[in-house]
Image: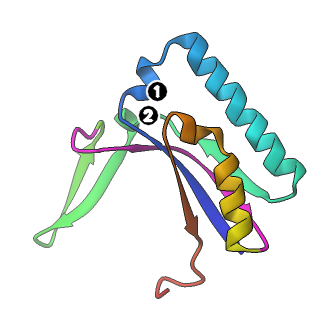
Amino acid sequence: MSFMLLMMEAPGKRQARPLEEGQKAYERMMAFQKTLQDKGVLVAGEALKPDDNAIRIESINGRRTVSDGPFAESKEIIGGFFLLNCKSREDALEYAHMCPMSDWGIVELREIANSCFE
């Protein structure tokens, strides 16, 4: 079963974090990634650049619009992800609980759908 752990935090929080605190957070996340690798469940994992480099494309009244970041209306930004292959939802939830990101942000666990109709 495939699951995604989404790492989310308030906009600007990463940039406002003191350098030393940011380095410690990064080290904790890299140690967590190593744990996932050692357990054989990590498929992929990456940090994402802040949303000031992001682009949104949406359709409003049948017309496509493009918006450049940052997005003031965002409550959280997705700062990264881990894609896991676990035996069960309970196993994935156990890994989500281990993720240090929940100490300063949000970890969202999502199961990967087999089709867009699930």
Q: Quadrant of residue 31?
A: top right
The residue under the point 56% across, 35% down is: 103
Amino acid type assigned to the residue bearing label 2 in the image: Pro
Which residue is at the front of the view, 48 or 58? 48
Which quadrant, please, contains the N terminus? bottom right
SS for callout 2: loop
Task: Judge from the rendering whether residue 15 lies leftward or rightward of residue 19; answer left or right.
Answer: left
Q: Which residue is pictured at 71% across the width and 26% down the height?
A: 27
Vertical order, 16 against 83 (above or below): above
Residue 7: within the magenta? Answer: no
* Residue at x 75%, y 43% (from the top left corner): 33
Element on which disc 1 rests: helix
| Start-end of magenta stretch | 71-87
Q: Residues within 10 Å of mark 1 (few under 14, many from 20)?
A: some
The amino acid type of the residue labelled 1 equals Arg
Q: Which residue is mark 1?
A: 14
Compared to residue 57, the image places residue 115 above or below, namely below
Residue occupied by mark 2? 50
Q: Residue 90's spot in the image, x, y percent?
A: 70, 69
Task: Tell me how far mark 2 sits from mark 1, CA to CA.
Answer: 8 Å
* First-in-chain label (2 vs 1): 1
* Residue 4 place in picture, x, y as percent: 61, 61
Left or right relative to 24: residue 31? right
Residue 46: image x %, image y %? Answer: 64, 44
**Left or right: residue 6 compared with residue 42:** left
Rendered residue at 71%/58% (across/down): 94
- Front residue of 33/106: it is 106
- Does the segment drawn in magenta span residue 74? yes
Residue 41: x and y in percent read 80, 59
